[in-house]
Amino acid sequence: MITLRHGTAAFLRNGGNVLLMKRGEHKEIAPGMWSGIGGHFEENELSTPFEACYREIEEESGIIQSHVHALELQYILMRRFKNEIRQSYIFFGETSQTDIIQTDEGALFWIPEAEWMDREFTDTFTFMLEHYMKREPGDRNLYIGIAEKGNEGVHIHWSPCKNTEL
């Protein structure tokens, strides 16, 4: 039987820095790896990824919704892990709030944008961030990434998810 796991992550910028989390070593998924701020959807949020993202931002950083600006859903990543399909909604935005709280999820750090790719992310996040950095200025597409593992390691197939309404 296959189950679904929905998650969200946000990468927030402020003054040339990006807020990243070094996940706790006790975490089930990606222990000790770097990530944006995020977590799992609550059951009542399955159809509202923005609500899940704002809730996770506040729970994990103390940054309240009114201090988050231009939050945009940029990626939906899908991958299979054993009998689970993991679907992650990835947001990018700005924040005017620099004071943050620390939780047992991991440690938060403001990292200069020029250095954020020097961190160890999961393969799917690494590929997603590399894709994000190569995007043309003004590219407002939402991208769907399907991860697969082959003989040469993990690869992601990217497709823009465009509005099909006429």
Image (spheres, grey):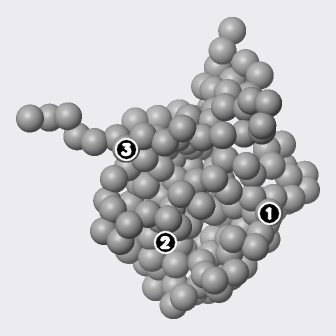
Instruction: Give the residue type at disc 1.
Output: Glu
Q: Quadrant of the C terminus?
A: top left
Q: How many angstroms separate mark 3 from mark 1 (CA)?
A: 26 Å
Q: How many angstroms separate mark 2 from mark 1 (CA)?
A: 27 Å
Q: How many angstroms separate mark 3 from mark 2 (CA)?
A: 30 Å
- Residue extending furthest toward the bottom: 15
| Viewer-closest of 74 and 48 | 74
Dot 2 or dot 1: first in sequence order is: 2
Q: Tell me what residue is drawn at x 80 percent, y 49 percent.
A: 30
Residues tagged 2 and 1 counted as in contact (Cβ below 8 A): no
Q: Which mark is residue 160?
A: 3
Q: Which mark is in front, 3 or 2?
A: 3
Residue 147's image quarter?
A: top right
Q: Which mark is residue 120?
A: 1
| Viewer-closest of 19 and 140 | 140
Report x, y in % for residue 146.
Answer: 56, 35
Dot 3 or dot 2: first in sequence order is: 2
Q: Quadrant of the N terminus?
A: top right
- The local crowd at label 3, few if under 14, some if 14 to 19, many if 20 or more residues have their Cα within 10 Å, is few
- Specify whether residue 6 is in view: no
Residues tagged 3 and 2 counted as in contact (Cβ below 8 A): no
Report x, y in % for residue 46.
Answer: 47, 35
Instruction: Give the residue type at disc 2.
Output: Ile
Report x, y in % for residue 51.
Answer: 43, 51
